[in-house]
Amino acid sequence: MGFWIPGCAIHEYTDGNLAKTQYRGRGLGGYAARAAVHVQRCVAVGYRRIVNFFPWFSPHTYYDIDMNAILLSPQWADARWFGTDDLGRDLFVRTMYGGRVSLAVGLVATAVSLVFGVAWGATAGYFGGRIDHVMKRLVDILSAIPFMLFVNQLMVVFGRNILLIFVAIGAVNWLDMARIVRGQTLSLRQREYIQAAEVMGASRARIIARHIVPNLLGIVVVYATLTIPQVILIESFLSFLGLGVQEPMTSWGALVQQGTQVMRIAPWVLLWPAGLLAVSLMCLNFTGDGLRDALDPKDAHR
Amino acid sequence: MLRFAISRLFSTLPTLLLVVVVAFAMVHAAPGGPFDSERQLPPEIEARMAAAYGLDAPLHEQFLRYVGGLMRGDFGPSYRYQGTTVAELIADALPVSLLIGGLALVFGVVLGVAAGTASALNQNRWSDHVLITISMTGISIPNFVVAPLLVLLFAIQLKWLPASGLRGPASYILPVFALALPMLAYVARLMRASMIEVFKSQFIRTARAQGLHRNTLVFRYALKPALIPVVSFLGPAVAGVLTGSVVIEQVFNLPGLGRLFIQGALNRDYTLVMALVILYSAVVITMNFLVDLIYGLLDPRVRYT
């Protein structure tokens, strides 16, 4: 089975203002930093294509066990570009498939938390008053709980199903989104076009769906970009602990875990997935952070 | 102040209660009982086991009994380690986690504040750029990647430090460092931003106009207000150390709470996992409460209402 990872429109937002606003420094450092922004963005967006297409070039599968090829070091012969793991499975293909799972979890769980958070925040912000108070209080209470542990308990109790992982991580990651959306909605509510819609007799549901939510999109996209690496991290954390995806399917977290067990004799089994995970998280974080700085003039991060 | 503290303390109770209720409900909604094994047991033995663990009572009664036990520090019996209570398991593991977590917290916050301040004072010079890049890297790379890489480099390749276990002070260095790193990076970033902000304010300009030395400016005037964002990060930081320690203790093979958590999770030892989630949540909630109190010490404008 394969996960086709749907396209995301993030790069369109980053194109114009990110490189301009983020690194203003002159001299060599400034230019290097601006170039680095483009590299980060390309990697963040390009990973999706790499993990989808590259396995096609390899003759191996992610599940075939080959006892004659245990812990081969990376080599050109027989297309073992990343080497093999302790069961003789091809590490290149496994790393790519792991990347698919990690990125798919990242995108799907972010989408779940997006829908939840935007609906919750926009409703609370638009209705105001007692409804807002109760909804906001609930978010406050929930965010006092260390959620990574809670997802963990969820996995323990309800078993390890990959769909459940998507939903569980998404369902506990919507709190920040709800808070931000609520704040933004509070200020949007005062705008003339909302009042105009109210005067024209539009229903509340229609105002939220057609007038509030579209105007929230900018900030929502920014925070979604920052949610993706967070979610990938949670999934990898669970897989690292052996609570995430199940063999023979894999993810970056599970691969790192396997790598730690054989790192004394075969460090490449650890280094490939660890390196790819680190680089992609870093690029996603840098991109999201740059986006936030670019779109939020008040934020004095630099 | 006292009135604020008490009312704030009471407002944390619903949160804690919610955690207990959700954790309890999840465990009891779980498919299969705690004593499922490959061997089919006769029904009368199963009934007796259920009675011995108090699982035959109606659900609300079980819940009340569990909460009553919590008040007395009794988390119930472990479902996997027979004849051992969860409280005993926790008491064995707590000191290890407490030491490592505490050291990492102190190390991370102190170094993070120092690095952030240094970075802010050298804003936009090359040392600042280097520090920002390092700290962003530290934030992005997860614990469970950093820790094995550290072991690979310092324990296996260079053989300077022990790779796992607890033998002597040297074996604490790698775990504490791995645990502190992301926190250090985040604190440095926060500190840098807030220090730059504080240095723009009027009272610093006044102090500078009086001809005070830069060190006096930083330590006497700027440090306290600049620490506020760092303090509000302490609540999430503690949560981070707790979840981080789950990974770190696994990698370094330390007999702490984190490893207990994983073992409980893999063995489906429901009472143990439930107790640890409740314990962790209680620590985080307490930390958030303390942070609210510390605000007033740092910023005289904060009024407790």
Image (cartoon, grey):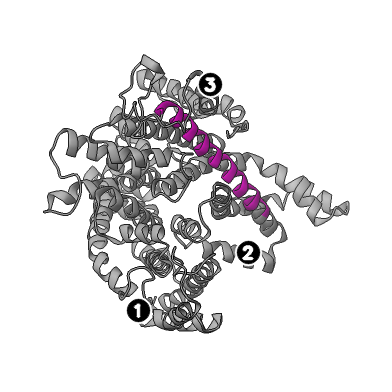
Helix, strand or loop at label 1? It is loop
Question: For this view, does A130 lie left or right of residue B266?
Answer: right
Helix, strand or loop at label 3? It is helix
Image vertical order of residue B94 relative to residue B237, above or below: below
Q: Nearer the viewer, mark 1 or mark 2?
A: 1
What residue is disc 2 on?
Answer: A135
Membership of A112 in magenta stretch: yes
What residue is disc 1 on?
Answer: B73
Predominant secondary structure in magenta? helix
Q: CA distance from mark 3 to mark 2?
A: 48 Å
Image quarter in which the N terminus of chain A is found: top right
Cβ atoms at labels 1 and 2 below 8 Å apart: no
Cβ atoms at labels 3 and 2 below 8 Å apart: no
Q: CA distance from mark 3 to mark 1?
A: 57 Å
What is the three-letter code of the residue carrying label 3? Trp
What residue is disc 3 on?
Answer: A56
Question: For this view, does A197 lie left or right of residue A55?
Answer: right
Image vertical order of residue A109 relative to residue B90, above or below: above
For the residue carrying disc 1, how many other residues have a C-alpha within 10 Å: few (<14), some (14-19), or many (20+)?
few
Q: CA distance from mark 1 to mark 2?
A: 32 Å
Residue A255 placement (x, y as % from top left):
39, 38
Residue B287 placement (x, y as % from top left):
37, 65
Q: Disc number at residue A247?
A: none
Residue B253 placement (x, y as % from top left):
25, 52
Toward the top, the furthest residue is: A77
Q: Say which residue appears at 37% left-offset and 18% top-offset.
A: A27
Membership of B10 in magenta stretch: no
Whether residue B192 is visible here, answered yes or no, is no
| Range covered by the magenta-colored residues | A90-119
